[in-house]
Amino acid sequence: MSGARVREPAGPDVPNVLVGVERGVATVTLNRPAALNALTIPMKERLLAALLDVGRDPTVRAVVLTGAGRAFCAGQDLRERMAPDPPSLDDELRLRYNPIVRAIRDLPQPVVAAVNGVAAGAGASLAFACDLRIAAEGASFVLAFGRIGLAPDTGATWTLPRLVGAARAAEIALLGDAVGASDALRVGLVSRVVPAAELNAEAAALAGRLADLAPGAVAATKRLLAGAFERDLDAALEAEAEAQAGAGSHPDHAEGLAAFIEKRPPRFRGE
Ligand code: LHQ
């Protein structure tokens, strides 16, 4: 990434989450490829810190979440669970996983999951929490929880039915079979599938398009869509009216109108 600022959240151990910012797009990379980016406690802490950090950065207008190596993320590091006295599962969820899901959903910027390989367990859940998913041809999603005697977590029981509907969610969550990229595209779990060699460029291009939009309008769109299944029609109409009052009074709306009349691309400033 030439010209990219590369930042790593502070900490003494290996940089297992990398953050690079280039032209308004922050790329957050899970970087523990030898273990298929399985999530350890320090890694989860770094991931949360990285997400909160990019969320506060006004120069970041879109985020890409991806994995280093051949996997997106194999979920919880199972070796860590087998160490003496691991934290209880519910503590681990409340203290570490759930805040990551909350951060992804609450970021004002849209988050694109660039699913480069297998996304298993909580790794699949993280991809489901993102606003858009683009997958490499060899990628797959595995709700592997059942195989180790656990129920889905990290938001998957909330996100998956919203993404693919109740019937498909039941198949995927209960049976735990791998859903390959083409099936994921067919059922709407991802919106694009590209050859592996093109994934990074496609994800960057997609995020770049999002980064060129008016940030306030993008944030409002994300918020409105996030609340869509919780509101009745009247509440949705009112939420749209309120969001439009905010967007319409922002200089970026005037810029968009001027750009249309002058037949030029808009230059949205955000803030
Ligand atoms: C791993 C892992 C891994 C450690 C591959 N851990 N090393 C759980 C508990 C706590 C709180 C909250 O919620 C959760 C949620 C969860 O995430 S539960 C689900 C956890 N994930 C899984 O059960 C998936 C386990 N992994 C697999 O089933 C396979 O590795 C997949 C299907 C992902 C990939 O299979 P392969 O392509 O055949 O790769 P592999 O199995 O040979 O793995 C490569 C290496 O990565 C290997 O290490 P090694 O030293 O032998 O080369 C694996 O041990 C390691 N690895 N997943 N989750």
Image (cartoon, rainbow, N blue to C red):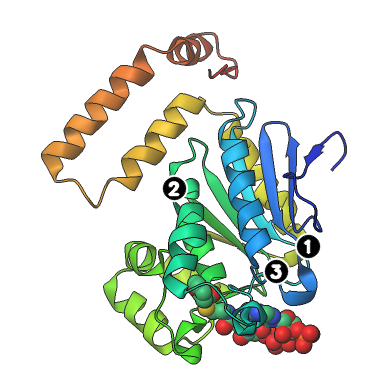
- Say what amino acid the circle numbered 3 marks: Asn
Q: How far apart are marks 1 and 2 (CA)?
A: 28 Å
Q: Residue 105 carries which label?
A: 2
Residue named by callout 1? 197
Which residue is located at x 78 percent, y 70 percent?
33
Regarding mark 3 in the picture, which secondary structure is present there?
loop
Residue 230 lies left or right of residue 66; in this view the side is: left
Q: How far apart are marks 2 and 3 (CA)?
A: 21 Å
- Say what amino acid the circle numbered 2 marks: Arg
Residue named by callout 3? 37
Which badge, 1 or 2, comes first in the chain's sequence? 2
Q: Distance between the residues labelled 3 and 1?
A: 19 Å
* Callouts 1 and 2 close, C-beta under 8 Å: no
Which badge, 3 or 1, comes first in the chain's sequence? 3
Work out whether 204 lies above or below 82. above
Give the x, y percent position of residue 210. Answer: 56, 36
**Quadrant assignment, res 165:** bottom left
Work out whether 209 lies above or below 183. above
- Say what amino acid the circle numbered 1 marks: Ala
Circle 3 Cα neighbour tier, 10 Å, few/some/many (<14 / 14–19 / ≥20): many
Give the x, y percent position of residue 157. Answer: 35, 69
